[in-house]
Image: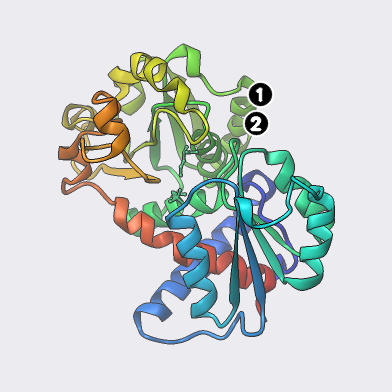
Amino acid sequence: MAGNLKGRHLLKLLDFAPGEIADLLTLSATLKANKRAGVRGRALEGRNVALIFEKASTRTRCAFVTACVDEGAHPEYLGKGDIQFGKKETVADTARVLGRMFDGIQFRGFSQDVVETLAKHAGVPVWNGLTDQWHPTQGLADLLTVQEEFGRLRGLSLCYVGDGRNNMANELLVGAAKMGMHVRIGTPRQLFPDPALVETARGFAWENGGEVTVAERVEEAVAGAHVIYTDVWASMGEEAKIPERIALLKDYKVTRRLMDLTSRRDAIFLHCLPAFHSLDTDFSRQFPDICEVEDEVFEGPRSRVFDQAENRVHTIKAVMVATIGR
Ligand code: CP
Ligand code: NVA
């Protein structure tokens, strides 16, 4: 079990060995079963956890808060405007102050450098709750969801379609490759992932029995896939790019036809959420072509998006228990 992770940061799955990721998934499954059985944990009793948010969040914030309370810790939400962070005080100074008061620090924001700087100076574990570059706690929840569905990860094909350069594409490329999955990215050439990252992921896949493919033709990318995954076409902070991304990605929308192109009746649909799948949000009313997935798939029998969202709490809890637990 992930006892050897005490004191570790979680900045990106790239920093974790496949066995460590597997241990975190096993611990997540145990904690999930305990919660379902009504067993109350005390692994985080007496711990204080700081939650710094520069960007908005529903799932990540609520998963950290509920996971803390479930295991007896105190979560403290520190929103953008609430603290001196970056305005009157450097990241390094903030890290040293919070590290004297808290047992662990979650950071969600723009720059990966900021979360890395927090980790360097805090003296306590720092967990990345999303940056422009990575989203490791989401990656863990995604792997748990796939494992629950198919009973394994190794040898399964996961196809991510959409913006091939965002935090989710990066995280899945590396995380799924480390677990021996076949990772495919279906995206237009303009949004191909960083070639150096693709090579790194190929190395992990090769070591663990998987493979990595980047394809412009979406039909090629999805053929035979067990998992079709997508994310918004413009991430937080990229709102000005929405019209350009709609033009680039409209043929990469996840439709019933795309799911059928997997030729697998057991293929599942995943999305980290929030998702544009209907015209019931402010953005989708303003940009009616913004939807990266059609309602029929999102609401359909192959969609596992709400299991995936629930798994955020179990995996985040596992990360905290493994790194700062009693
Ligand atoms: N998937 C995810 O990180 O959701 P939030 O932005 O709501 O935290
Ligand atoms: N790529 C998305 C993920 C949201 C959970 C974003 O960064 O906005």
Q: Secondary structure at mark 2?
A: helix
Count of labels shown? Answer: 2
| In the rendered image, the vertical position of residue 6 relative to residue 299, given as above or below | below
Circle 1 sits on which residue? 196
Which residue is pictured at 55% across the width and 35% down the height?
170
Q: Quadrant of the N terminus?
A: bottom right
- Quarter in which the C terminus is drawn: bottom right
Residue drawn at x 47%, y 64% as measured from the top left:
63
- The residue type indicated by label 1 comes to Ala
Q: Find out whether the residues at labels 2 and 1 contact each other: C-beta distance under 8 Å.
A: yes
Q: Position of residue 134 (x, y in %)?
A: 59, 41
Ligand 2 neighbours mark 2 (CB distance < 8 Å): no
Q: CA distance from mark 2 to mark 1?
A: 6 Å
Quadrant assignment, res 175: top right
Tell me the residue that label 2 is attached to. 200
Q: Is residue 164 above or below residue 37?
A: above
- Residue 170 in sight here: yes
Of residues 292 and 99, the one drawn nearer to the viewer in this rendering: 99
Q: Amino acid at mark 2?
A: Thr
Q: Residues within 10 Å of mark 2 (few under 14, many from 20)?
A: some
